[in-house]
Amino acid sequence: MFSRHGPPVGSNSFDHLHDQGRINPALHGQCLPPPAFVGSTAGPSFSGHSFDRAPHSKARGFSLLELLVALFVIVLVTSLATLNLGSGGADLELESRLRGLADTGSFAADEAQMTGRDYGLLLQRVDVGGEVVYRYGWRERRQEGWRAPASGREVFAERDLPSRVELDLQLEGRVDSEVPVLDDPATATPQVIYYASGEVTPGAIDVRLRADGRLLWRLEWDLLGRGELLPRGERGIDDDDA
């Protein structure tokens, strides 16, 4: 009896394939290996041949020189950005210190009138970590002489200006002597006096860049202690242009 699509029922399938020439007699009775799968590196096929994987193109990596160049560019850009940010931050710090000086001067003028005691602004040069910086502080006239104010210690605390700047002090229209290095700053006489009568020693402080002497700011005040901070010493210039 025959099936519709296969060998006669009950017959040997190997004999049937042998009769049709579809199997090698030498392989009769042996297990055939499975066909090779696509993508395998090598494997036998029905014909006894092996299939090699198709060659793939290798991805080219960066050379050491290219990596060094890229790293150099990154470091350079980062350094420039840090330099710009650092310069801007230093300018803001300087402006903040000078505005604080002007505001404290106004406060000292008010305190002098309220307490009936003279106050003064003392400028000096000091050595900080091997660098000469300009320091400003405040004094109060007492019976024993000029001393640090007894009240408002936080407001009248001494403060240093950045080491990159230097000061020129002008009093009553004349350029004063160079800001000194004081032997005994605790008892030194201040240069600018805020009198209890309401008058102030008129003058100005020029703040210059130490490297080239360029004028950055001018803080000036009149006989009544009214002060003004001028970018580059000129009126009508925005602070951003200083």
Image: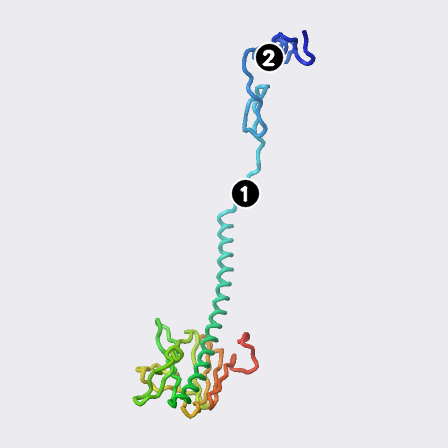
Q: How many marks?
A: 2
Tell me how far mark 2 sits from mark 1, CA to CA.
Answer: 48 Å
Where disc 2 sits, the SS reads loop
Mark 2 vs 1, N-terminal side: 2
Q: Residue at x 56, y 12 (%)?
A: 27
Q: Residue at x 54, y 74 (%)?
A: 240
Indicate the amino acid at tag 2: Asn
Q: Could you say where residue 213 lies in the image, as x and y percent from the top left? A: 46, 78
Circle 2 residues within 10 Å: few <14, some 14–19, many ≥20: few
Closer mark to the observer between disc 2 and disc 1 = 2
Q: Could you say where residue 128 lies in the image, as x and y percent from the top left? A: 35, 73
Where disc 1 sits, the SS reads loop
Indicate the amino acid at tag 1: Arg
Quadrant of residue 172 within the rendered picture: bottom left
Quadrant of residue 198 within the rendered picture: bottom left
238 left or right of 155 in image: right
Q: Which mark is residue 24?
A: 2
Which residue of the protein is positioned furthest toward the bottom in this rendering?
A: 197
Quadrant of residue 49 within the rendered picture: top right
User: Which quadrant does the N terminus fall into?
Assistant: top right
Q: Nearer the viewer, residue 189 or 45?
A: 189
Q: Residue at x 61, y 11 (%)?
A: 13
Q: Residue at x 48, y 61 (%)?
A: 79
Which residue of the protein is positioned furthest toward the front in this rendering?
A: 114
Image vertical order of residue 16 relative to residue 161, above or below: above
Q: Could you say where residue 25 lies in the image, as x and y percent from the top left? A: 59, 10
* Residue bearing the label numbered 1: 60
